[in-house]
Amino acid sequence: MSPLNFHHLRYFWAVAKEGNLTRAAGQLHVSQSALSAQIKQLEAQLGQPLFHRTGRALTLTEAGQLAFNYAETIFATGNELVAVLREGRREERQVLRIGAVATVSRNFLENFIRPVLDRPDVELVLISGSLVELLAQLRVHSIDLILANQRVHASSTEPWRCRRVARQPVSLVGRPRSSSTSPFRFPEDLAHVPLLLPGRDNDIRAGFDLRCEQLGIRYQVRAEVDDMALLRLLARDSDSIALLPSVVVQDELRTGRLVEHAVVPDLYENFYAVNMARRYEPPLIEALLGRSEAQILQPPSD
């Protein structure tokens, strides 16, 4: 096996960072044809294409993203060498990029990433957005993993890898009732209390509506809220009862500021992790996904 040509690797790294051959050639002060030839030589040595070429657009292949990650580490290590010898300092960091669908509980997200939160060698990049937006970023390898509360189906053109990492019952929660008030009865009291519910496009809401229809119950809606963080605040600061997974209000339940009035039978929130079907799974992702459901849902200790 011939040794890696680091000159070629640096040229590839520059093009990958720019995403454009012309701009990278200008920065490196070489012709586009010379730059293209060097990258083709690197691809030939590695035995895999590093870019998808569509017209003038360049996007990294899976092998290209892996090569780029190694190149980032190699050249960062070179900079570190200079820093250590000149200034006596050293810094090693891995970058982990996780996207979370906006409707996913922020408590769940925090629980999921907790094993790497305090690691000085890990830099976390957390991105919120719609599932469509995040899948577009995952497609070009600009994020490593998506956390969602709906399943994503793979196809021949979209090689998503979707796995359920946790499931939680859905509860009706609210402020503690006064001692003079009778305990909440499910489902009898549903028609007599104002409810805070997820939006109608949410799977939880659809399941709850079906359950109420089967029971012949007409409920009162105080507010429909797509954002779980806002739903948590409204449950905490109003006299309404909210429909949500307990992980959303785990801190308030622990302190007694909110109580679980009832668990809705046969209604669950599913949490999924989505990434690309790939041969090279980043070790940090493997470690996070290798935990049990109980470990992933474990709230922080006091």
Image (tube, rainbow, N blue to C red):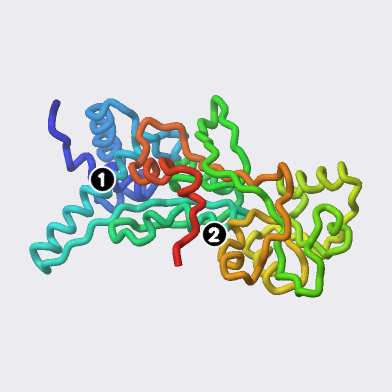
Q: What residue appears at the point 78 percent right and 64 percent down from the top-left corner?
A: 183
Element marked by disc 2: helix
Residue 125 in the figure: left or right of residue 73: right
- Residue 69 vs 193, above or below: the answer is above
Foreground residue, 67 or 213?
213
Q: Position of residue 105 (x, y in %)?
A: 59, 56
Dot label at residue 107: 2
Residue 192 in the figure: left or right of residue 95: right
Earlier residue among tags 1 and 2:
1
Residue 290 appears in view: yes
- Judge the density around disc 1: few (<14), some (14-19), many (≥20) Cα neighbours within 10 Å: some
- Judge the density around disc 2: few (<14), some (14-19), many (≥20) Cα neighbours within 10 Å: some
Q: Position of residue 174 (x, y in %)?
A: 71, 66
- Residue 250 vs 33, above or below: the answer is below
Do residues under tags 1 and 2 come within 8 Å of each other at their CB atoms?
Answer: no
Image quarter for residue 32? top left
Q: What residue appears at the point 37 percent right and 30 percent down from the top-left corner?
A: 279
Dot label at residue 71: 1
Amino acid type at image mark 2 = Asn
Q: Position of residue 270 (x, y in %)?
A: 61, 44
Q: Position of residue 137 (x, y in %)?
A: 50, 46
Amino acid type at image mark 1 = Ala
